[in-house]
């Protein structure tokens, strides 16, 4: 995992999430374009982060005043991609290097879930690319 630098705002958001939910955050990204905050939490803490009937995530969303998205971290790129794209059904993942040295991932999803995986205006695929670059140094992700 590459070194991740957090801004003061991101550290404050992580502390807030941990205080409100009890879930441990590994990373936080403030996405100004999509007006959302993406938290990457420790494996196994998804239930804590969401809370009963979504109560914890709703409370966090109200306190922050922005959309909040939570992704469960995984040690392998394959499992992490599946977590990021959830609930879209991932059928296969192929990670390779191009001749120019860039690493890319081709993700095959169920045709019915392709729109969900890409998201409105490419919102979900942009999140996927950002997180994979930040955590596994994968330069590009393609949904097929």
Image (spheres, rainbow, N blue to C red):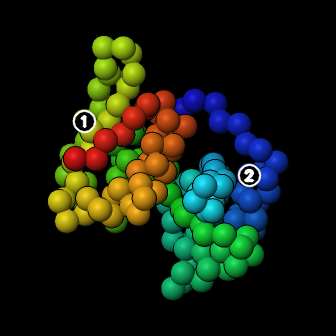
Q: Residue 65 carries which label?
A: none
Q: What element carries label 2?
A: helix
Q: Residue furthest front?
A: 121
Query: Which quadrant of the figure has residue 37?
Result: bottom right
Q: List the residue tagged with mark 1.
A: 94
Residue nearest the observer in this picture, 57 or 46: 57
Residue nearest the observer in this picture, 12 or 114: 114
Tell me residue 84's x, y (percent). 42, 54
* Residue 142 in the image: above or below residue 118: above
Q: Which mark is residue 10?
A: 2
* Residue 37 in the image: above or below residue 27: below
Q: Is residue 37 visible?
A: yes
Total label count? Answer: 2
Q: How crowded is mark 2: few (under 14 residues within 10 Å), some or many (20 or more)?
A: some
Sequence-earlier tag: 2 or 1: 2
Q: Give left or right: position of 18 versus 58.
A: right
Residue nearest the observer in this picture, 76 or 101: 101
Query: Which quadrant of the figure has residue 124?
Result: bottom left
Say which quadrant the N terminus sits in: top right
Tell me residue 45's x, y (percent). 54, 63
Q: Give left or right: position of 67 versus 109.
A: right
| Residue in the picture at 66% in, 69% down | 66
Tell me residue 106's x, y (percent). 27, 39
C-alpha distance separating marks 2 and 1: 32 Å
């Amino acid at each position: 995992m590459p070194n991740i630098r957090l801004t003061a705002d991101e550290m404050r958001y992580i502390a807030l999430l941990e205080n409100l939910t009890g879930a441990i955050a590994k990373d936080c990204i403030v996405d100004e374009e999509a007006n959302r905050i993406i938290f990457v939490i420790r494996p196994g803490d998804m239930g804590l982060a969401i809370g009963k009937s979504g109560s914890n995530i709703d409370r966090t969303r109200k306190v922050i005043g922005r959309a909040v998205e939570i992704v469960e971290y995984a040690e392998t790129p394959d499992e992490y991609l599946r977590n990021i794209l959830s609930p879209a059904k991932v059928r296969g993942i192929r990670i390779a290097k191009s001749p120019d040295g860039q690493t890319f991932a081709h993700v095959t999803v169920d045709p019915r879930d392709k729109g969900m995986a890409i998201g409105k205006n490419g919102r979900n695929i942009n999140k996927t690319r950002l997180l994979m670059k930040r955590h596994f140094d994968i330069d590009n992700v393609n949904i097929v």
